[in-house]
Image (cartoon, rainbow, N blue to C red):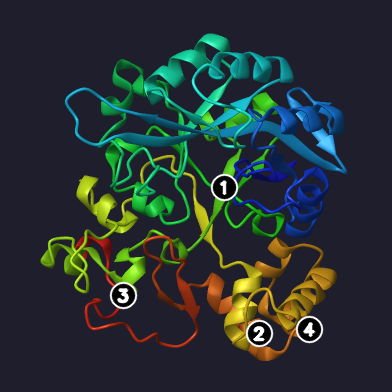
Amino acid sequence: MQVIADLHLHSKYSRATSPHSDMGGLAEWARIKGVGLLGTGDFTHPKWLKELRQGLTPSGEGLFEHQGINFMLTAEVSNIFEIEGQERTKKVHTVLFAPSFEVVEQINDELKSYGNLAEDGRPTLMMDVAELLDIVEGVSKEIMFVPAHLWTPWFGLFGSKSGFNSMEEAFGKKASHIKAVETGLSSDPEMNWMLPSLDNISLISNSDAHSPQKLAREANVFELQEVNYKSVVDAIVTREGFVKTYEFYPDEGKYHWDGHRKCGVWMDPVEARKLGNRCPKCGKPLTVGVMHRVVDLANREQGYKPKGAVPFTSLVPLTTVIAAVRGRGEQTKGVREEYFKLINYFGTEFRVLEAPKEELRLAADKVLADAIVNAREGKVHWRPGYDGVFGELSFSKIEQPAYSAKGQKSLMDF
């Protein structure tokens, strides 16, 4: 049985999250997108946990069902801590998968002394991320511990602002206990394959959605004999039955290039290094992006694919394609109408995005049908995302500022 899974998202109890991110809203948009398995998100939050207990029914060992969609118990937590001898405070986000409500209750009981779990769906814990690993392993060996959006500058384990340079630096002798990491929106597997240290760690991709409409902008595809908690975790760890991931183009992610949002400045690593990683307008430090950080830590050329690596498919969300073609905002009435016209015709968003050109032309005009095909074939142009600003899609050349490198480059050019 093939299942598309999005395992990292947030409920209405997380900051800056849609009030529609309740079980009903999440289940509805999972059907629209074509997702069969969702993470619950936020199981550390007492109100959300109560709603999950009331609204979910067991559907398989370690999985639960609501309105026809399977859910896995998941949560993201934020660790803030200092390490003796290091100047920078560390800030690291981690996603936890749990096999049962009983295990969740034990996790929450352990974590409540490190932070206020009721304050935010993604709680802030004043503890070392290595200590977090020790605690969850002490609760249950079945818990999966996944460093979230690995490269994000501010909260990724390898982030430029507050992260580490290796798993060993973060977890010491327990580095081998990390079986999977989340690539995040601003990197794709090919970028991560440039680090031999990640060869034995599976790469998963999830939406980190803060509204139901953003579900499955990244996702995982599994082929499983039975869909349950253990089969999903085993597929991630062993890669047997792990078919592929769906990925953002990294350029679209909001931390792909270096930049300074307040000044509207973005640039590739070459230009940033020439300027001492400082903004050419105000002189303040740039936010060093994911591409820059990957190149700093990589010791393998781009294009290498490790043995046993899970393949991936790069896609652009359907509303983003429609908006770019029509020159309108993604939330405008016209874009929404075209979106649901295609959903009604094909059944789900993933079916639209992967439909043959001939079928797309039966449901949409030639311009839009060709744009959907061009987007999945990489025949697009981007103003790369930077410093919290998502990348801008265009089907024609985008003019770059004087301080930005011209043209597409390989990572090894940096």
Helix, strand or loop at label 2? It is helix
Q: Position of residue 87 (x, y in %)?
A: 19, 34
Helix, strand or loop at label 3? It is loop
Q: Mark 2 or mark 4, which is nearer to you?
A: 2
Mark 3 vs mark 4, CA separation in Å? 34 Å
Verify CB contact (< 8 Å) between mark 1 and mark 4: no
Q: Amino acid at mark 1?
A: Asn
**Residue 54 image label:** none
Dot 2 or dot 4: first in sequence order is 4
Residue at the spot of label 2:
368
Q: Left or right: where does residue 366 sit relative to residue 60? A: left
Residue closer to the observer: 70 or 389: 389
Mark 3 vs mark 2, CA separation in Å? 24 Å
Residue at the spot of label 1:
206
Residue at the spot of label 4:
362
Q: Position of residue 111 (x, y in %)?
A: 54, 19
Label 1 environment density (alpha carbons within 10 Å; few <14, some 14–19, many ≥20): many
Dot 1 or dot 4: first in sequence order is 1
